[in-house]
Image (cartoon, helix red, strand yellow):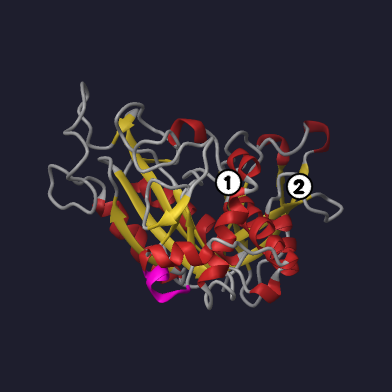
Amino acid sequence: MSYQAEYIWIDGTTPTPLMRNKTRIIQDGKAPDIWGFDGSSTNQAPGDDSDCVLQPVFQCQDPLRGGDNVLVLCEVLLTDFTPHPTNTRSSCVAAAERFAEQEPMFGIEQEYTFFKDGRPLGWPVNGYPEPQGAYYCGVGGQKIVGRDIVETHTLACMEAGLHIEGTNAEVMMAQWEFQVGTLPPPSIGDELWVARWLLMRIAEDFEVEVNWDAKPIAGDWNGAGAHTNFSTLAMRNDFDAIIAGCEALGRNVDEHIANYGEGIERRLTGKHETARYDQYSYGVSNRGASVRIPWAAAKAGKGWLEDRRPNANMDPYVVCRLIMNTICSDAETGERSQSSSDLADAI
């Protein structure tokens, strides 16, 4: 008996790539293998040389179709089977392999906003809803919209076997978050992309759009981020390694900001629980810092750090590669902060 495999990939649209998908019918007993697509329709090839290759890299059960059907995340290759220029996964894999001995691990908090008819879901046609305050982790029909979509998405991720850790309503009305992790690279990126795809696909059935913009509504409203939690084996055993990681990130600010998602200057303003994009800071339990050290890590003297700068529309492969290259390469050189004990004493 045949089954359906939904091939999913990331296209070449700039500045923020789109997700693409198409269905392949596969005979029973056969596994999904390489396939192709028209790259001239996805901003990945010219019309006179349009073929691109889909290489399966991650597979899970299809929770929407059920049965033996599967979701197949693919990376894009050129026809000579080298990575396509838009393939950011390949460089993430290379960084993960380089720093494998440090055992890097990630957890990502993915924020997003539901939109319908050109405005956030549940917002009045004219004017604005009540100011922020009651929406975060809130309950009640006058404040919280989209929970039916969120519940459906959460169950779908669980049925697919994804490492979804939780969900919550966020600070702005119609804004939500789900968390994926803790996973090594590139698996964290693979599962986040599939979870994003599932959310958009499920929202279709509710005639709602998922908006990943960093600042979907200008003014006194929170933006949408993808806070990225990171640790190495050393961090999970030593607080000094966490401080060293924070200081390493502070020495490479420009490259990270330039690659943390489109519209980052609109979101990282120094307001609405953000640090300014052109300033760098870190601190324990400080949501206004660029990088937050969770209080639990400070209390335990080991754990992880949270880079609060990445946008909701960031590419997880790019963000994970940058964090590894900055922190793990710094650790290889043996550079360590002399101020870590001072911060520990202040906790």
Q: Residue at x 76, y 37 (%)?
A: 45
91, above or below 277, in the image = below
* Residue that carries the numbered disc 2 in the rendered image: 52
Give the mark nearer the N terminus: 1 vs 2: 1
**Contact check, label 1 and label 2, Cβ < 8 Å:** no
Q: Quadrant of residue 328?
A: bottom right
- Point out residue 301 in the picture as x, y percentages from the top left corner: 45, 74
Secondary structure beneath dot 1 equals: strand
Q: Quadrant of residue 100?
A: bottom right
Label 1 Cα crowd, 10 Å radius (few <14 / some 14-19 / many 20+) = few
Camera-nearest residue between 281 and 219: 281
Q: In the rendered view of the protein, which quadrant contains the C terminus?
A: bottom left
Label 2 Cα crowd, 10 Å radius (few <14 / some 14-19 / many 20+) = many
Q: In the rendered view of the protein, which quadrant contains the N terminus?
A: bottom right
The answer to whether one can see residue 180 in this image is yes
- Point out residue 21 in the picture as x, y percentages from the top left corner: 57, 50
In the rendered structure, which amino acid carries the disc numbered 2? Cys
Secondary structure beneath dot 2 equals: strand
Please state if 128 lies on the left or on the right of 295 as rendered. left
Q: Which residues are magenta?
A: 296-302
Please state if 26 lies on the left or on the right of 177 as rendered. right
In the rendered structure, which amino acid carries the disc numbered 1? Arg
Outermost residue, top direction? 126
98, above or below 170, in the image = below
Circle on res. 306: none
* Residue that carries the numbered disc 1 in the rendered image: 20
- Whole-angstrom CA distance, mark 1 to mark 2, is 13 Å
